[in-house]
Image (cartoon, grey):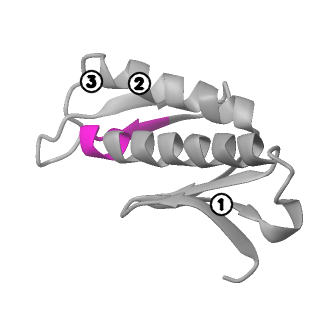
Amino acid sequence: MKDINQLHHNSYGIAFKWESNIMNTAAIQLVFRDINMSLPLSKLHVFLNNVQKTLSEEPIKPITDNNSKSYVLETPSSLISLVMSFNELENLQDLLEGAIFKINMEIMLN
């Protein structure tokens, strides 16, 4: 994985930029669950806002056998929504906040 510039990771996923695009904030890769998204910084902010909004909403009825509550998360693409648990949302929030913080630090230092 020498070809990536890791922005942030946790037990849930990783946010990175390809080395060839270190200064191009339009190519941020967000990998979590079985999902890979390529988002510009502006869309990372939108996605983080959606996660924070979803965390404050009531969950939908349990859709699994173990009665875990699920939340519908809108993605930056209006055509795609994800069903996630509260813990997954918290982990995704951490991933997004860490990536945005690192990108802002890189911008400030350059």
Q: Amino acid at mark 3?
A: Ile
Q: Which residue in the protein does label 1 denote?
A: 16
Nearer to us in this view, 61 or 47: 47
Q: Amino acid at mark 2?
A: Gln
Magenta extent: 82-89
Q: In the rendering, at what x and y percent does residue 39 appear?
A: 72, 43
Going 39% across and 59% down the picture, which residue do you hit?
12
Quarter of the figure that contains the N terminus: bottom right
Q: Are marks 1 and 2 in contact (CB under 8 Å)?
A: no
Work out whether residue 12 can be spotted.
yes
Query: Residue 109's x, y, as percent?
Result: 74, 47
Q: Is residue 37 above or below residue 16?
A: above
How far across and down, in percent of the image, does residue 13 sit? Answer: 47, 60
Q: How many marks?
A: 3
Which residue bears the numbered disc 3?
60
Q: Is residue 82 left or right of residue 3?
A: left
Q: Which residue is mark 2?
A: 52
Q: Residue at x 65, y 45 (%)?
A: 105
User: Disc 1 and disc 2: Cα gap in Å?
Assistant: 21 Å
Marks 2 and 3, how far apart at CA: 16 Å
